Image (tube, grey):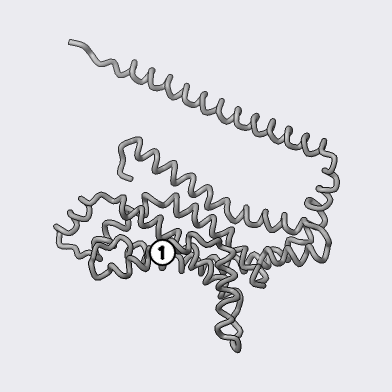
Amino acid sequence: MAIFDSSAVSAVELEREQYRKSEGLKSVVTSIVSALVLAVVVATALRLSPGWIDVKRSFFNGKVFVESIPTVAQGLLLNLKVLVFAVIGVAIIGTLLAMIRTSRSAVMLPLRWLAAFYTTIMRGIPMLVILYLIGFGVPGLFPKTRIDPVILGTAAVILSYSAYIAEVLRAGFNDVHPSQRAAARSLGLTNLQTLHLVVVPQALRKVAPALMNDFISMQKDVGLISTLGAVDAIRAAQTMQAQTYNFTPYVVASVAFILMSIPFILLNDWYSARLRSRELNGGIV
């Protein structure tokens, strides 16, 4: 009768663990070295460029950079406020559109047509054009009433991105296996309860990475409200550029948007890796 040697298994497992750690360390070192080499190559190429001194003076002026931070930061607060309201509005309208498009009720047929028409049109029109249509078209309907451009810009962002979010959510709803709906209905749940308790939670887990990507894109496009006259980070940078005759304030605004996006990019990468790991391990997504 063969005897199971637990110590041998432990030794093998320890050897594998040590190998994984050494490989992980090699990967980290290789990544750092390759990043440094790339940075050196880019820096060298820039310094050898004939016009690098002029570009550095116009776009990377340290004094102008520091002077622009307070003004751009104040404008960035407006971007954050618009983003908060836009996220809420897009979440509500996008979810309603997705629920209408995935409905199987005959009564909802006209609404499904309208929802399909809306998402098709809105996804086909560039964001800047929608901003112009809303920002200058709506005030034209009410010439005696002054409408805040921030409100108009927020509405334009909501109308545009709700179409994208609706399609992402619709794909998530359709990806939930029909057996899940059937099981929920067999337990006595209504259509609305099935959507709320069974379909929506599973769909959100499946499309969360795509939703985060759309959120990051919306975060950047919020800066386009400056075209309507709203004093956000981009408009503040433009004002500073006009005063200093230097483009460095735009770099400050870009850095601000990048810093604002990094947490969501990291969260998206972490969640995508987590879902992929659970799928590979046979877990429930």
Q: Is residue 185 left or right of residue 173?
A: left
Report which quarter residue 192 is drawn in. Answer: bottom left
**Residue 8, percent from left and from top:** 34, 15
Residue ID at (78%, 64%): 240
In the rendered view of the protein, which quadrant contains the C terminus?
Answer: top left
Residue ID at (72%, 66%): 236
Q: Is residue 60 left or right of residue 267?
A: right
Report which quarter residue 71 is drawn in. Answer: bottom right
Q: Is residue 266 left or right of residue 42?
A: left
Residue ID at (70%, 63%): 72
**Residue 228, percent from left and from top:** 64, 71
Instruction: Indicate the amino acid at tag 1.
Output: Gly
Q: Is residue 280 above or below residue 102?
A: above
Report which quarter residue 10 is drawn in. Answer: top left
| Residue situated in front as seen by the camera: 80 or 47 | 47
Q: Secondary structure at mark 1?
A: helix
Q: Is residue 23 left or right of residue 32?
A: left
Number of numbered discs on residues:
1
Residue ID at (55%, 28%): 27
Residue lying at the far bottom of the rendered structure: 144
**Residue 265, percent from left and from top:** 53, 49
**Residue 82, percent from left and from top:** 56, 68
In the rendered view of the protein, which quadrant contains the N terminus?
Answer: top left
Give the residue pinned by disc 1. 94
**Local crowd at mark 1 within 10 Å, few (<14), some, or many (≥20)?**
many
